[in-house]
Amino acid sequence: MAVDQRAGTRTAELQAERERLVARGIATAPLFVERAHGARLTDVDGREYIDFVGGIGTLNGGHTPETVVAAIKEQAERYLHQCYSIAQYEPFLEVCRRLIACHPGTGPFKALLVNTGAEATENAVKIARYHTGRQAVVCFENAFHGRTLLGMTLTSKAMPYKKGFGPFAPEVYRAQAPYPYRGIGTAEALASVERLFKSQVDPSAVAAMIYEPVQGEGGFHPATEGFVEGLIEICAKHGIVYISDEVQSGMCRTGYPAAVARWGCEPDLCTWGKSMGGGLPIAGVTGRAEIMDSVHPGGLGGTFVGNPLSCAAAIVALDQVLDPAYQEASRAFGDKLRGRLEDVASRVPAIGEVRGLGAMLAIELVEDRETRAPAAALAGRTIEIARGRGLILMGAGVLSNVIRILVPLVATDADLDEGFEILEASLREASAA
Ligand SMILES: Cc1ncc(COP(=O)(O)O)c(C=O)c1O
């Protein structure tokens, strides 16, 4: 990304320090935050930005929600850390109670708290392997499940997530995922799973299948009608544990605590993270009690899992997610966002498709609507121009030609008016370049 070279600015100074101190491998934008609230943040030079990224879907409830901040402060006065394996505490149980309520179906379910989405992936697979006594895992094209060894193995984008990091974890098999805009529908994707079972791995060796009901990093692809239902049917037939990765799609981003509920499906396990902590790091796995309880005591855990401060924040965030009025408001917000994006698309020919579910939406950029040739450079230029104009955007997609919208659900009409105006102007300027 281009560096802000405005000589003498605090941003330029800090960017130089960043280059001296911080490993190159973390991709960064030349933007240093001073403070943030709602859907807006202010940088160290006093510039204000509308935030359409929300910490990559981690701030569905907005920056610094008052209730979350108050809960963290109150908890900080009592105790900061215990390690749940050494001394237990009630907020951990209260988060589990609420996370279980987010899991679609009637249960009984149990929960495990961890620190990050990648850890949730790792633990879900560990639990499924233990439960089934099998090793193989089936994942999908366009997937993203984290940056740990198994997480990046399950992920389906080589650059930047896999290049140079092999060898990868064994026993991972990949099937097609629906991508109707590029010709893959429910039938093709389900057939690819059956083909995999003939050509690469016998289903009796498969412990788990993991799928994001709305694929995030891979390009904001919602499951097509019948796809998740079909996967769950296949899993039930072969005794495979079905894992719904809700790390990005969960927590009311799509109008439901778990996006998979949109299709009325009941996964065996769900992985959670991002907005679950209202801005603090916490993640989890929920699932059928008999599967979750397969593992012996001591087989799961970690020093910081369910940190008390994160639990205090998560209780507030989860109460909101479980509130039917909030779910309804999220769906209405999603409709509003889609309307705005379609409006922009009606005037900007580079937008090939507007897609997503609820408020988890994206635009796929193309060189030409007929050929659908992906316009990755255009996406990159648009993001940079938008930042210069005061709007934070982020890309997505295996082809790097998607711009995702994860604006906090608390954004006001004024935030949206300004943000979409900048988005359209930036797309036009980038298209003209
Ligand atoms: C669907 C999905 N799963 C897992 C992860 C990994 O989460 P984390 O970055 O917290 O490890 C992400 C992160 O973007 C994600 O989008």
Image: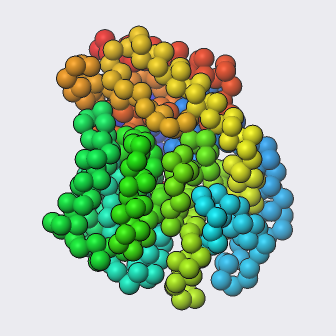
Which residue shows up at 41% across the image and 81% down it?
132
Residue 37 visible in the current orientation: yes
Q: In this view, does 408 lie above or below 118?
A: above
Q: In this view, does 394 lie above or below 56?
A: above
**Closest to the observer, 319 or 278:** 319
> How is the structure coloured here?
rainbow
Residue 298 location, x and y as percent? Answer: 56, 87
Residue furthest left in the image? 199
Q: Which quadrant of the figure contains the N terminus?
A: top left
Residue 26 visible in the current orientation: no
Residue 11 location, x and y as percent? Answer: 52, 33
Which residue shows up at 69% across the image and 37% down it?
328
Residue 185 location, x and y as percent? Answer: 30, 41
Q: Which quadrant of the figure contains the C terminus?
A: top left
**Closest to the observer, 95 or 389:** 95
Q: Is residue 320 above or below residue 43?
A: below
**Closest to the observer, 244 or 345:** 244
Which residue shows up at 39% across the image and 24% down it?
382
- Where residue 241 sits, quadrant-wise, is bottom left
Q: In this view, does 251 lie to the left or right of 127?
A: right
Q: Is residue 418 above or below residue 25?
A: above
Q: How many numbered callouts?
A: 0
Residue 274 location, x and y as percent? Answer: 56, 52
Q: Is residue 199 left or right of residue 182?
A: left
- Where residue 348 sits, quadrant-wise, is top left
Which residue shows up at 56% across the image and 35% down it?
359
**Closest to the observer, 77 or 109:** 109
